[in-house]
Image (tube, rainbow, N blue to C red):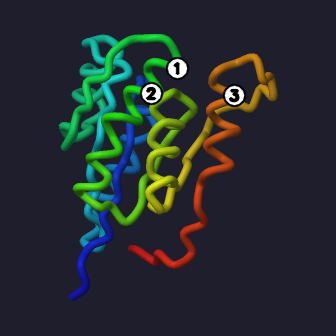
């Protein structure tokens, strides 16, 4: 039997948690996938994070980077600094990011620079407004995602 595909699932903010819940549920059911949940800590309080884990049945994160609040640039940089060593040490087969928050772009950028495939799941509306930080994150993340045709899992 071959080794399971290690998928790093990145969450950081409330909208990510809503999107990752059904994905984690399905990945946990598949023996050929080793899902690893990484919380960046972009949203970290009870109302913006913990309550969603409980109510949506999301497993406790395997890793929490505990980044916290800050400007867009600071927060993105902190996530990059904290996730890169984790990616180097744990060597995931690919990184799955959801949404359009700072955690999404930072994890994608770190992964692709290390040669780790990136998959982006986004269900949000496109504003096409380049003055919105979320739209900038979406466009940049879309430019970084990697086609993972070689992965045939489940």
Q: Does the residue at mark 1 contact the one at mark 2 (Cβ under 8 Å)?
A: yes
Residue wearing tag 3: 135
Residue wearing tag 1: 73
- Residue 54 is situated, as x and y percent measured from the top left of the image, at 22, 28
- Residue 71 is situated, as x and y percent measured from the top left of the image, at 49, 11
Q: Is residue 99 left or right of residue 59?
A: right
Image quadrant for the N terminus? bottom left
In front of the other: 154 or 134: 134
Residue at position x 36%, y 48% in the image: 9
Within the image, what quadrant is residue 30 found in?
A: bottom left
Residue at position x 54%, y 35% in the image: 99
* Earlier residue among tags 1 and 3: 1
Residue wearing tag 2: 77
Q: Secondary structure at mark 2?
A: helix
In front of the other: 140 or 74: 74
1 or 3: mark nearer the eye:
1
Q: Residues within 10 Å of mark 3 (few under 14, many from 20)?
A: some
Q: Secondary structure at mark 1?
A: helix
Q: Residues within 10 Å of mark 2 (few under 14, many from 20)?
A: some
* Earlier residue among tags 2 and 3: 2
Q: Is residue 147 left or right of residue 75?
A: right
Within the image, what quadrant is residue 38 found in?
A: top left
Position of residue 7 relative to residue 47, above or below, is: below
């Amino acid at each position: 039997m071959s080794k399971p595909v290690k998928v790093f699932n990145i969450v950081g903010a409330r909208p990510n948690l809503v999107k990752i819940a059904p994905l984690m549920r399905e990945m946990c059911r598949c023996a050929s996938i080793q899902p690893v949940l990484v919380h960046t800590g972009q949203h970290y309080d009870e109302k913006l994070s913990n309550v969603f884990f409980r109510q949506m049945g999301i497993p406790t994160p395997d890793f929490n980077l505990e980044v916290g609040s800050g400007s867009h640039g600071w927060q993105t940089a902190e996530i990059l600094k904290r996730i890169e060593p984790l990616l180097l040490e744990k060597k995931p087969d690919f990184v799955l990011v959801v949404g359009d928050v700072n955690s999404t772009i930072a994890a994608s950028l770190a992964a692709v620079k290390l040669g780790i495939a990136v998959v982006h799941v986004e269900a949000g509306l496109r504003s096409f407004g380049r003055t919105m930080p979320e739209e900038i994150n979406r466009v940049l993340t879309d430019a970084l995602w990697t086609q993972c045709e070689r992965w045939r899992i489940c």
